[in-house]
Image: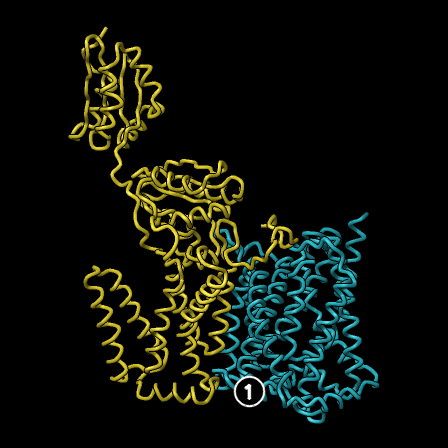
Chain colours: A cyan, B yellow
Amino acid sequence: MNRYLYYFIIVTMVTNIIASVPRILMGESKNGVILSMVIAVIVGPILVSVLVNLFRHFPNMSLPEILKKSTSKWFYYPVLLYFAISWYLAGLITLVTYVLLFNTFISSETSIVITTLAFLIIISFGMLMKEKSVLYTTEIVLVMFLPIIFFLIMKVYTDPRLEWDYIKVAATHIQELPSYNAISAAAFIFIGVVNLSIFNKYMNFNKKFGLKHMLLLALAGVFTLFTTYFVPIGFNGFEQIENFTFPWVTTSDAVRLKFGIIERLIFIFLIVFLGVAFISLLIHWHVSLKLFESIVQIKRLKWKEINLTSYVLVIIFGVIGILVTRQISEYELLKLTLFFYNILPIFYGILIGSLLIAKRRLKT
Amino acid sequence: MAKSNPPTLMDELSKKFEPSSDIMLKPLQIGDNKVYLFYLKTVVDGNKLHTIVIKPFFEMKSNESFQSYIESLPEQVEMTSGEELQIKLTKGAVLVSIEDRFYLLDIKLVNSDAVQQTLIEPTVYGPQLALSEDLDTNLNIIRQRYHAPTLMIEMHDMKEKSRPQVSIMYDEKTVKKSVLRNIKKKLNSLEAPLIQSAGDLQLQLNGSKVSLFPTLILTERPDRITYNLAAGKVVLMIDGSPQAVIAPIVFFDFMVSMEDSYHTFWITTFTLVLRYLGLVICLVLPAMYVAVTSYTPDVLRTELALTVAGSRLGVPYPSFVEVIFMLLFMEFLIEASMRLPKAISATATTVGGLILGTAATEAALTSNIMIIIVSAVAITSFVIPISEMSFAIRICRYLLIFYTTLFGTIGLILGALGLLMFLTNKRSFGEPYLKMYWKGEKKEIGVTTKNE
């Protein structure tokens, strides 16, 4: 199996440990969140395996190529546009969340626009890179940061202030009926696989995505969700947990590194997670840019033989990014994120449906 | 039947070379046998000419046997005409005329074929001798170290003014064909007025004029050359330069010292880790100082934060000015000690490093901690084995300081990630510059290369 596929999924998982997912889960903590997570852990890997096995039928092709080859214009234009906007939104949510996070916890004096700008300048270069470079960057950043993240999480788990009793209290809510919000938020951690729609071009799946791989993914999902949901509860108690804006970050601030140069765990935490979140943003927006490029190519925008369409798109991406981060409040962000997570089934439906159509059309 | 006049070709040639004083047009005669020699005295080995041409001529009985003797000499090269002939003569060829037939013998005199000590990349163990300034000697050195029939050496004549020979060397078994084609294409399309050394060649092949990171390694060590040949890389050598150019190169190649091959596993691993640590420190530390002092002092543990703040007490300007000011002085110091003759360079380091450093802190122009950081940065930047890479890193350091100054702590992290992306996006003759290589890469069904 191709290792880059796992990187995509891991990146989304890690990014969402401290971002919006814990907050949504905490919000639903008395509405059957545990069963929801169980369902998500089962449904997520199944969706991943369905998608991978569908993409396997189109080796060395990206989604725009597949659709353009097999379906007609009136079908693939709206579909691709929908996907492009969705990916842009996914990236935008990550961007806004982490900018807010960073401004709240590390540099509260810097203006939001400046922080966003720091992101946007670098990400603009990243979006315009070659596809393979995105893969290589992902790999290197993960290899550098994952060990640190693992160490930090272990540090949190072994901290004496982690009260397992609180977790047991939370676990008693197992008999409640699952809620839709919680399922979609928990299932979101598996969304990394859909990045295949562009990167499928560079992957070669020679084996089927089988039960073994699904089990592996489910285990990773269980670990991620357990860490996401229960650890903040273990530190802060079950009753108070709904009121935190960023439960995980607040939690990490409770841990001290006794012998480190940096004493408060929160700083290393934010910085390391920021690195991975940046990669998540990079992948999402890169895919979004490629999808947009497959729809619009303005022929007149030429300067010295180079078509400037992608540059214009990148600038539009950035401008919208700045406008949104300036305007949005934390409450609105939560609403937007929740809305985005909730429409995921439609997203999956359209993706799987169009792939099935393409597969049938290409066969005949 | 002997002619009394030299052949017309030689007359023409001597007219073309006219005001030069080193042209020799020499008739040799014994009895009826007469032979003409034409050459440039300064580039031809006189002793060799005497033993292989002049002496046998007087020992031979007839012109016919001398002719067949000349024809069977290994020094004989293909006869050419026009300007090409003149170029060959300037390179040390001798034109021999026997009975209206012309032969060209390569009897050049090389004064620069002495093998030099390793100066740029010295190691404690391993070979202590580097290359020489003569291409043939260098090829001999490599052939002596790499006894493989698959080692191919192709010669390529450059088209510019000094017309040096460039040899393209590769192991046919391991070399990547696309890379080889790429390099040859680039070599053919070079349009430089004058290429004098391997460094020049490297610069010309590096791609665009304004690139920061080198995509070729310049080396003087024969063991590094053979090491890279075995790994399937292409080595270019240019006549008259004691360095060779290796391509394609990835980032990790710059962090390999040849010393690594001569030590045990743990020692090698330890020094390798040290080197990467040095790389990170010399790249990030100054920018981190800016971030920590000016933007987020609360990151550090309280005692340390207080120490840093205390040491900056009385410094009249923001931290980024301090950092750039001190780093620039360090760069001046390095540059000065490199350019000065050996006898004086020690003075520069003493005055600059010891006296200036102490005085600057006492005058409260900079903090004590800044001095420590600057020295740490200076030391760690010399840990990188290939100096071109350490130069590139030096420049990146300023970019990172700049980005951190603008955006604070987040700028530091994002700037570092941006640098990483820049490196992963770079290609060296079509090969990715920075990429993780796992064991068994070929077996793994990974990212295919055919789409690029």
Query: In this orientation, which residue lies closer to the viewer: B391 or B122?
Result: B122
Q: Is residue A159 above or below residue A116?
A: below
Q: Amino acid at mark 1?
A: Arg
The one nearer the camera, B286 or B227, is B227
- Would residue A15 be found to the left or right of residue B83 on screen? right
Residue shown at 49% from the left, 42% from the top: B180
Task: Indicate whether A300 appears above or below B90.
Answer: below
> What number of labels is visible?
1
User: Image point 49% across, 46% down: which residue?
Assistant: B230
Q: Position of residue B209 (x, y in %)?
A: 39, 53
Nearest the eye: A129 or A11: A11
Q: Circle 1 — which element?
A: loop
Task: Indicate whether B411 appears above or below A65.
Answer: below
- Residue B264 picture location, percent across and down: 47, 59
Residue in view at x 50 percent, y 82 percent: A260
Is A223 left or right of B88, judged from the image as shown?
A: right
**Residue A195: horizontal and vertical position, in percent?**
67, 63
Question: Among all residues in the image, which is located at the extreme top?
Answer: B1
Left or right? Give the position of A146 relative to B123: right
- Residue A301 visible at all: yes
Q: Quadrant of residue B43?
A: top left
Q: Decide if residue B200 is in sight here.
A: no
Q: Decide if residue B124 is on the left or right side of residue A5.
A: left
Residue A86: image quadrant is: bottom right
Q: What chain letter is assigned to the residue under label 1?
A: A
Q: Residue B193 appears at what percent x and percent y?
A: 32, 43
User: Which residue is more in the foreground, A212 or A341?
Assistant: A212
- Neighbor class of circle 1 (other Cα within 10 Å; few <14, some 14-19, many 20+) is some
Residue picked out by circle 1: A256
Q: Residue furthest bottom?
A: A239
**What is the quadrant of the N terminus of chain B in the image?**
top left
